[in-house]
Image (tube, rainbow, N blue to C red):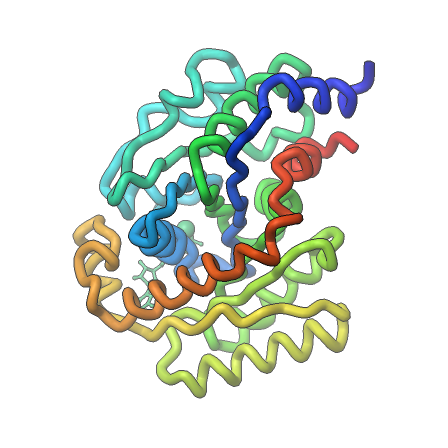
Amino acid sequence: MDQAERLRELMAEHAEAKNEARIIAISSGKGGVGKTNFTINTAIALADLGKKVTIIDADLGLANVDVLTGVMSKHNFMEVLSGDVEAKELVTEGPKGIQIVSGGSGISGLVDIDDLELERLILALSYFNATSDYIIIDTGAGISKSVMSFVGAASELIVVLNPDPTSITDAYALIKNIENPEEKTIQLVINRVESAQEGKEAFEKISSTVQKFLDIEVENLGYIFEDHNLGKAVKKTSPVMIEYPRSISSKAIERIARKIDEGEGKQEEKKSFFGFLKRLTKKT
Ligand SMILES: Nc1ncnc2c1ncn2[C@@H]1O[C@H](COP(=O)(O)OP(=O)(O)OP(=O)(O)O)[C@@H](O)[C@H]1O
Ligand SMILES: [Mg+2]
């Protein structure tokens, strides 16, 4: 039996999912644009809308989800593959009941896993699929293999960028490297803008370039203003949505979360957990 068949069989056994999560990858072309803060605060805003959210921290960098929420994970995803821990044990509870899961180094190696590891991976992801409305993956920046494996697997991608020219160029490079982009919903968030006009100009610049050279449509999710409260919250290792819920960045993130949630209808057919697994493990 080839691995694709095996995957199908395992899915049938484990993923009789009554609940299907929307799986959203958060990425950026260059580092430091605000992905991790966006991920956490959007998760909190979705939780405020009554949604169950799991964050998978697949970024191998330093200032990761753990640090920005002040909670430390005991275990990471790689320990699940080796059979040492169960999916449930991976979860650290973050603010507003968000489930935070640390990817751990090596999560990029999912492409060449054996049958036993595949089964454990499916079991673990099925658990999160069944217990969440949203699985949000902080993929890290750039076009490395590990980043692109999650970007490629998720049917929904949010690219975070800043309005400066290098950030725009790097975001374009990321979008250019996506496999089968026409099968995905690609949405942009412009972070750290000084005015709505600046955000609008940045969006128009990148969307017209993407349209012209790649023939891809990208959607505008919104702009987040430069906000010193966000930096202050980071210093307290706490999300801005918790520390300063009325700040200008929190309000923008709330609007963006509502927009994401309203997009649910047209995502219905894309919420295929099987498709996600197939792409993640490259079993076709
Ligand atoms: N809207 C904002 N206003 C002010 N400062 C911001 C804003 N967004 C992000 N920052 C600042 O940028 C820093 C980096 O943010 P964050 O760690 O979320 O970026 P990242 O894209 O996840 O970085 P990396 O690529 O290293 O993982 C934050 O610590 C914060 O100081
Ligand atoms: Mg980060």
Q: In which quarter of the image is residue 17?
A: top right
Q: Position of residue 148 (x, y in %)?
A: 63, 46
Q: Which of 113 and 249 is in front in this view?
A: 249
**From where the camera sits, is residue 197 visible?**
yes
Instruction: Identify the residue at horizontal 49%, vertical 49% (top origin).
Output: 140
Q: Quadrant of residue 110?
A: top right
**From where the camera sits, is residue 40 visible?**
no
Quadrant in which the C terminus appears: top right
Q: Position of residue 126 (x, y in %)?
A: 53, 27
Q: Where is residue 180 in the image (x, y as percent from the top left)?
A: 75, 53
Instruction: Identify the residue at horizontal 48%, vertical 76% (top origin).
Output: 164
Image label count = 0
Q: Up-down: is 149 above or below 157?
A: above
Q: Position of residue 99 (x, y in %)?
A: 35, 36
Residue at the right extreme?
1
Horizontal relation, residue 175 to residue 159: left or right? right
Instruction: Identify the residue at horizontal 29%, vertical 69% (top origin).
Output: 251
Q: Up-down: is 13 above or below 143?
A: above
Q: Up-down: is 84 above or below 113?
A: above
Horizontal relation, residue 75 to residue 229: left or right? right
Instruction: Identify the residue at horizontal 68%, vertical 77% (top origin).
Output: 209
Q: Nearer the viewer, residue 8 or 66?
A: 8
Horizontal relation, residue 268 to residue 96: left or right? right
Residue at the bottom extreme?
197
Quadrant in which the N terminus appears: top right
